[in-house]
Image (tube, rainbow, N blue to C red):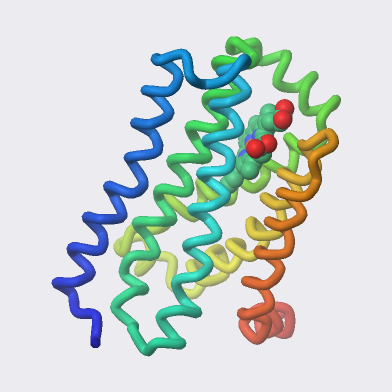
Amino acid sequence: MRITNKHVFWLKALMHVVAILPIIYLVLAVLGDEAGGDPVQYIIHYTGIGALNTFLITLCISPIAKKFKQGALIQTRRLIGLYVFAYATLHLMAFISLDLLFEWTLFFQETVKRPYIVVGTVAYLLLLALSVTSLNAVRRKMGKRWQQLHNSVYLVAVLVPIHFFWSVKSEIIEPSIYIAVAALLLFFRKSQIQRIFKRK
Ligand code: HEM
C-alpha cells in the first residue's frame, strides 16, 4: 500500500495524540501522588527518556521510508522532531525550575560538578537550532547551509546517549542499550555520514 498525503494527515493526528498522552499521564501521576518518592527526579527522568525515545523514532523514519519506498512518511519527520524539542524543553525546564529553583548560579556550579550537563546543553542547543530552522521558508532561505546544519542531528545522536550514560550512578544497562540502539541507527546511515566527512 502506498502512503498518500491523506494517510499522512491522519498519521500526524495520531502522532499528536501519542506524543501528548504521556504528558497528560505525567501530570496526573504527579497530581495523584504516584510519581514515586522523589517527584522532581521522576519528572526529569520521564521527560529526558521521552525526549530520547522520540529522537530515536525520528532517526528511524528515513530508513523505514527508504526500505518500504514510502517517501510520504518523510513529511512526518518535522512534527516528531518538534516533539523531541518539546520534551527536551520540559526536561530542561523541570531541572531549572523544580530542581534548581531558578538559582542560575547553581546551574553553573552543577555544570562544573556534573559535566554530563554540558553534553546535554550542547545537544539541547543543537535541537533548538534544528527546530527554529525547520520551517520550509527558513529552509529555502538557508539553501545549502540548511543541510549542513541539519547534519548535526548525527552529533545529537552521539551526545544524548552519552549524556544519559554519564548521568547514571550505577544502573548502566539501560543507557548502554540506548548507546547500542543509537550506534545501530547511525550505522544504517554510514554512507551519508562518510559523505559529510569527505566534503570537509
Ligand atoms: C540543557 C540541557 C540539559 C540539561 C540541563 C539536562 C539535565 C539532566 C539531569 C539533571 C538529568 C538527571 C540526572 C540524575 O540526577 O539522575 C538528566 C538525565 C537525562 N537527560 Fe538530560 N539534560 C539536558 C538535555 C537533554 C536532552 C537534549 C536530552 C534528550 C534529547 C536529555 C535526555 C536525558 C536522559 C535520557 C536522561 C536520563 C534519564 C533517566 O535517568 O532515566 N537531556 N538530564
Q: Quadrant of ligand 1?
A: top right
Residue 25 in the image: state x and y as whole percent. 38, 31
* Residue depicted at x 52% and y 45%: 51
Residue 188 shown left or right of residue 133 in the figure: right
Residue 48 in the image: state x and y as whole percent. 58, 39
- Visible residue check, residue 124: no
Residue 4 shown left or right of residue 145 in the figure: left
Quarter where residue 24 is shown: top left
Residue 99 in the image: state x and y as whole percent. 63, 16
Residue 44 shown left or right of residue 160 in the figure: left
Name the foreground residue: 112 vs 181.
Answer: 181
Quarter where residue 4 is shown: bottom left
Name the foreground residue: 1 vs 58.
Answer: 1
Residue 109 shown left or right of residue 137 in the figure: right
Q: How many marks?
A: 0
Answer above or below: position of 159 versus 171: below
In which quadrant is the C terminus drawn?
bottom right
Furthest residue toward left: 6
* Residue depicted at x 30% and y 62%: 137
Residue 170 in the image: state x and y as whole percent. 84, 37
Answer above or below: position of 47 versus 60: above
In which quadrant is the N terminus drawn?
bottom left
* Residue depicted at x 64% and y 48%: 123
Name the foreground residue: 156 vs 44.
Answer: 44
- Visible residue check, residue 114: yes
Answer above or below: position of 149 versus 89: below
* Residue depicted at x 46% and y 87%: 67
